Amino acid sequence: MKATTLFDKVWDAHVVEHVEGGPDIVYIDKHLIHEVTSPQAFSGLEARGLKVFRPERTIATPDHNVPTVNQHLPISDEQSRTQVETLKANCEKNKIEMYGLNHPNNGIVHVVGPEQGHTQPGMTMVCGDSHTSTHGAFGAVAFGIGTSEVEMVFATQCIMQSKPMKMRITVDGELSKGVSAKDLTLYVIAQLGTGGATGYFVEYAGSAVRSLTMEGRMTVCNMSIEMGARGGMIAPDETTFEYMKGREFAPKGEEWTKAVAKWKELKTDDGAAFDKEYVFKASDIEPMITYGTNPGMGMGISGSIPSEKDVDPTELPTFKKSLDYMGFGLGDKLLGKKVDYVFLGSCTNGRIEDIRAFASLVKGHKKVDAITAWIVPGSKKVEKQAIEEGLVEVLEASGFELRQPGCSACLAMNEDKVPAGKYSVSTSNRNFEGRQGPGSRTLLASPLTAAAAAITGVISDPRELF
Amino acid sequence: MSIDKFITLESTYVPLPNENVDTDQIIPARFLKATSREGFGENLFRDWRYAPDGSVNPDFVLNKSEYSGSVLVGGKNFGSGSSREHAAWAIHDYGFKVVVSSFFADIFQNNALNNGVLPVTVSSEFLADLFKSVEADKSQKLVVDLEKQVISFNGKSEEFVINPYKKDCLLNGFDDIDFLLARKEKIEAFEAKN
């Protein structure tokens, strides 16, 4: 039999029909929806006189628009409230399970899917959100779609997609102390650039990737989209099964044993061909930070922003424009630069492990008064766990408080906005102009680097604070 | 819902030479709160078009009266970032029918096609010529012939690639959902087998 990749195995098993000269019709096992990219799909469906074809394969949770305080009160922003209420009404009408605000399963769609066991190896999963790539950490083919495609999945449980090319990114060796999955992914994106994986589906491999926890793997797959990839995935293994076992919607008993046996076959065969391969050494990676207005503009925290001679002349005008926006200059070092805001959260780094990492570094230190810090759990379950593990007490003793779950300052659709001109060290996934509020300046980093900034007030190397 | 039929278009064009124009620039997140598809054109490139106090930024190309047309020509890696289809809606609602660049982000490209906006990928040399030419003559027109898959201006032309199925959809004004709904039986057969 021909050697095939993990991606091929999952994709090919879901092709209902290959359209000649066109895309594949791919069956979708799990459709995740939220309040921002679904209302127009529901109304489109209604205009065609249709109902959701397979509502039992759909899970809904409001996350983008929700406030991170006083969630027991009605949402004060009228438009946000309308969007959340529209989701609820559409779900009721179409018999879709929804985890509304204050429901114990509520949270960011890409955090709740895995933690409740909805996300499983070998599945095809889509959501009207580019960071759907997160679920690939379990060996699922998961990718973001537009609203017309959300409507398509509602109507037929299928999607029409051309099969992407395949890329493998191997990271071998051991990550150094203070270097996390977030640094690994920011490093890879800095090497490939924001369009470096456009047209590809990425499989991550190598000993550094294998040794990551599930939370770490989710962070890496989550950021795949930031180099243009359609999605990222990692072959399931004992780490995956260990994480999944006993989760609410994971198979149980005999079903579990059968499922694990099947999942163990989900890996790339020896000798299978990729359209592109990259290999990196874990030992080359230090804590990373971005200095520009796309996630590819990142560097080791002790490094310097490239000088004029290091930038492709055709790209120099855009590069300079980006630095101007950030208030940085060519060749600048960032260590010691003043920070105003710190954001821990999002579908990239709003998991329990991220809060643990942040708490471990701030323990015994005090938050700098001038820093505004938003510590936002990715879900109600993460919030509960942070309380149970005593992390909230550690945070409070250092001057931080835990907010309520949601996407929050990652894209600033709610009240958590960074003011114009202010600097934010953020554990989220995008540093685009105005992403955290009009005029805001975002530096992407790991939870440890964010914690270091919060207790020193400046950009600091977390390795020096252990 | 069907999409607009697209055959051949001749138009002046608006140059936006910035690279990595991401979806947050095309339509910032704070304008994604609507529950209908209409009206997003008003906030297309909001933070580049207007100053924070709401006044018009005279330096931004959409605010310069000498540039017009239903074609937007953008820099490399256009539409990166979020999956928000609102970006395609904003471009369509503003009146653009074609976006030209040397490189498009995947999801944006799909979203554009699903809304009757044709993304045309050209070589970086062709793109540079387009930018140069419009600076010399703002009434410079380009022609996009979808049937022949050719884009031309000022005596230069280049072929572009488009998936044959998607081309068919655009030429005839039908969409994927119509196509899929006609295959319900096949889908149910797939479900029964798996």
Image: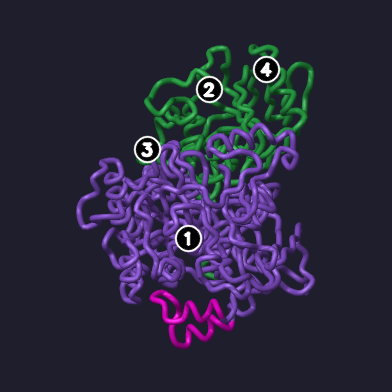
Tell me the amino acid under the disc marked 2. Phe
Residue located beneath label 4 in the image: B134
Q: Quadrant of residue A172?
A: bottom right
Shown colour of chain B: green
Decide: few, some or many residues near mark 4? Use Cα within 10 Å; few <14, some 14-19, many ≥20: some
User: In the image, which residues are magenta?
Assistant: A239-261
Decide: few, some or many residues near mark 3? Use Cα within 10 Å; few <14, some 14-19, many ≥20: some
Magenta segment, prevailing SS (helix, strand or loop) = helix
Say if the magenta span includes residue A259: yes
**Observer-nearest of A221 and A267:** A221
With respect to residue A2, does A55 lie above or below? above
Q: What x and y, as percent, mark residue A25?
A: 59, 55
Decide: few, some or many residues near mark 1? Use Cα within 10 Å; few <14, some 14-19, many ≥20: many
**Subunit of label 4:** B
**What mark, if any, has residue B36 been given in the picture?**
3
Tell me the amino acid under the disc marked 1. Ala
Contact, mark 2 vs mark 4 (Cβ under 8 Å): no
Front label number (4 vs 3)? 4
**What mark, if any, has residue A452 been given in the picture?**
1
Front label number (1 vs 2)? 1
Contact, mark 3 vs mark 1 (Cβ under 8 Å): no
Tell me the amino acid under the disc marked 3. Ser
